[in-house]
Amino acid sequence: MTVTDGILIKGIGGFYYVEAAGEIYECKAKGIHRRKGMSPLAGDSVQITINNEGYCSLDKIHERRNFLIRPPVANIDKLFVLASTCEPLPSTLVIDKMTAIAQDKNIDCAIVFTKEDLKSDEGLAEVYRKSGFETYTVSAATGAGLDEIRNAINGNICVFSGNSGVGKSTLLNALIPELSLETGEISEKLGRGRHTTRQVELFKVGNGYIADTPGFAAIDMLDTKLLIRKENLPFCFKEFLPYLGTCKFSTCTHVADKGCRICEAIENGEIMKSRHESYISMYNEVKDIKDWELK
Ligand SMILES: Nc1nc2c(ncn2[C@@H]2O[C@H](COP(=O)(O)OP(=O)(O)O)[C@@H](O)[C@H]2O)c(=O)[nH]1
Ligand SMILES: [Mg+2]
Ligand SMILES: [Zn+2]
């Protein structure tokens, strides 16, 4: 009997598949969820017992650094927010909602601009670099930028998010050819029914993992109202952090307040205008929400 630690790759029908030292073990959970009210998630760091007969049990879920409910993945090192350079046109508000919600959950983000064979990112990558993000510009069609994405995944547990049509499945297929995910609009419509019961699975890319998150195309990250309190919102824009607490009034909402250091930083070009516009738009969504309305 051997006790060891591993990473939960996927769970299907009561079985959990755990990778430990390069081997995959099929494990039964020992009722941990019932006891602790915690169900194992892909990405969980777990302790398993390998019996001599080959039976394995999942005994323990180690503490999570972070997790998402939709898609259900734990211990995410990097959330790649994908935006397409065209078709669908990139929306800074959509990108900024995803990065804000990730930040609120203590998840690091990188921004990926896709389809660069069709159109350039028109300076958007620069906006995000200046805002402190790693950015990538890629084309699954030509292979441009794919090595950089592979390097970024190496050693990490990663998730792709982004609106439908930005090229998540296409990029996953380019990185992991044996995956053969369906892509494009038609497959998305036809596929909906068939794919809803599929589980999240982590796939190996180099020495890291990328989650295939079927049925979670747009990641449920766009409902700011349900997710972020207005007090927390300024902290969800990481480039605001050095300025917080330095505004003239401690009640500053950083929207257009007198003596607001963040508004000044925009004038100086230290904070990007589009990021602040997203902040204002999200602030207006959440400002009247009462505590009891949040989950
Ligand atoms: N030209 C070009 N088309 C792409 C690229 N990536 C994705 N597409 C196309 O964009 C459409 C949507 O891609 P898909 O991967 O299904 O998007 P998803 O909804 O985010 O999974 C498909 O028709 C793809 O062929 C790319 O790098 N270049
Ligand atoms: Mg897809
Ligand atoms: Zn302020």
Image (spheres, rainbow, N blue to C red):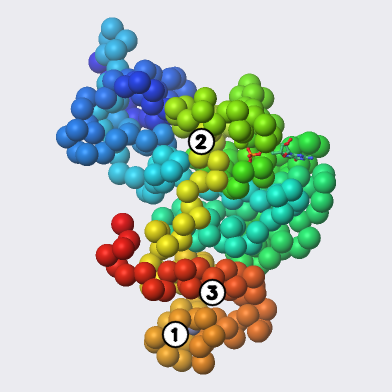
Q: Quadrant of residue 206?
A: top right
On screen, 23 above or below 68?
above
Mark 3: amino acid: Ile
Q: CA distance from mark 3 to mark 2?
A: 30 Å
Residue at 76% over, 42% down:
139
Q: Amino acid at mark 2?
A: Gly
Q: Position of residue 153 (x, y in %)?
A: 58, 40
Cβ at disc 3 under 8 Å from ligand 3: no
Of 276 and 53, nearer the camera is 276
**Location of the N terminus (image quadrant):** top left
Q: Which residue is mark 3?
A: 280
Q: Are marks 3 and 2 in contact (CB under 8 Å)?
A: no
Q: Earlier in the sequence, mark 3 or mark 2?
A: 2
Mark 2 — residue?
215
Label 1 beta carbon less than 8 Å to ligand 3: yes
Q: Secondary structure at mark 3?
A: helix
**Residue 22 location, x and y as percent?**
47, 23
Q: Nearer the viewer, residue 151 or 167?
A: 167
Q: Which residue is mark 1?
A: 252
- The span from disc 1 to disc 2 (Cα, nearest Å) is 40 Å
Ligand 2 closer than 8 Å to label 2 CB: no
Q: Residue at x 72, y 54 (%)?
A: 89
Q: Position of residue 99 (x, y in %)?
A: 53, 58
The alpha-carbon separation of the residues under discs 1 and 3 comes to: 13 Å
Q: Secondary structure at mark 2?
A: loop
Placement of 110 over or under 57, stated as above or below? below
Q: Nearer the viewer, mark 1 or mark 2?
A: 2
Which residue lies most toward the top here? 53
Q: Nearer the viewer, residue 61 or 226?
A: 226
